[in-house]
Amino acid sequence: MGFRKGFFTDTSICIGCKACEVACKEWNRVPARTDADGPAWQGSSYDNSGHLGANTWRHVAFIEQGPDQLARAKASGAVLLGMPKRTAEPTRLAEPVEAPAEPVGLPAVRWLMSSDVCKHCTHAGCLDVCPTGALFRSEYGTVVVQADVCNGCGYCVAACPFGVIERREKGVVEIGDGTQEPVPNGGVAQKCTLCYDLLRDGQTPACAQTCPTTSISFGGHTDMVAKARARLATLHEQGHTEARLYGANPDDGVGGTGSVFLLMDEPEAYGLPPDPVVTTRDLPRMFTLAGMAGTAMIGVALGVFAAFGRPS
């Protein structure tokens, strides 16, 4: 692997414009749907793409929160920072109140918006279980699907702890003049490639090029992690104790991710697993231990043979 590339997504400045979703679909020819029903409105949000999948390589989430949820987010963030927990013990001198007071200094409502994407994990379960070699680690450290090699077995779908990769359903899509054509790469696994074709030309992925607020940054992975940590420190200095990083810990269950996020609440609020684990992460160590055990057994057998000679 060469110079690793990656994303830093700062959700604190995401405005939910979905320009990244559109740019991703336009550049990679990702269909909106595999049927003619159009966008699937969720009924509880302005989100019309729902989640990452074969036809959604960038997904902008809209999460509406009230003051109580914001207060909980700040409290949980303070615990992560090692700050003392605030308590308000009742006293005999306190006058009873008829209704609970609203949290002081917090807005009545806030929107959390976040552009989610494939994590391009350091230890990628999808890559480990692929039986055909359709998934490969590129020279940029990204995980890419070769559609012409994929047999559609779906092992990678079950191996991803983030629910990112998915098999694209076969069908037809309408093009500009009203005619229909087959869905590209139907029946095989599909996900973000981090615009591998653009990277090979020395360019930036389409989503990062399009983002109007620089919520999506792209560059060397080490630089992106450093930028994320600096931004986190700034937000903490401003009193945003709820801010935290996701994917920047190389000791987590996937060895850290190529796509690092700054979140303004716990991962669960964004539909992200709090502690993602790839079960195949320990395979190299297991193979090494098995090899050592095999070598030891051979050594013991040779020692016994040398001590007692050949059987008569």
Image: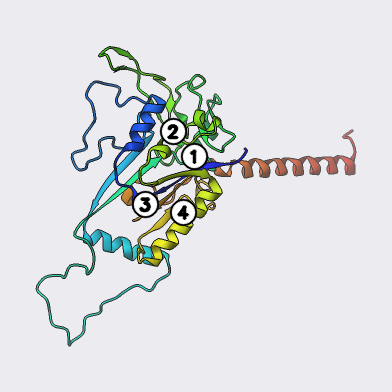
**Near-viewer residue (137 or 109):** 109
- The amino acid type, in three-letter code, at marker 1 is His
Q: Is mark 4 on a helix, strand or loop?
A: helix
Three-letter code for the amino acid on which mark 3 is drawn: Pro
For the residues labelled 1 and 4, the Cα–Cα distance comes to: 17 Å
Q: How far apart are marks 4 and 3 (CA)?
A: 16 Å
Residue named by callout 2 = 192
Residue at the image point whose x is 18% and y is 39% from the top: 43
Q: How is the image coloured?
A: rainbow
Task: Look at the image and tell me in which quarter the N terminus lies.
Answer: top right
Dot 1 surroundings within 10 Å: few (below 14), some, or many (20 or more)? many
Q: Residue 206: where, in percent of width, then height?
A: 42, 34
Which residue does the numbered mark 1 point to in the structure image?
120
Q: Which of the marked residues, 1 or 4, is nearer the chain's N terminus?
A: 1
Whether residues under marks 1 and 3 lie with C-beta atoms below 8 angstroms apart, the answer is no
271 displayed left or right of 36? right
Tag 3 or tag 2, which sits nearer the N-term? Answer: 2
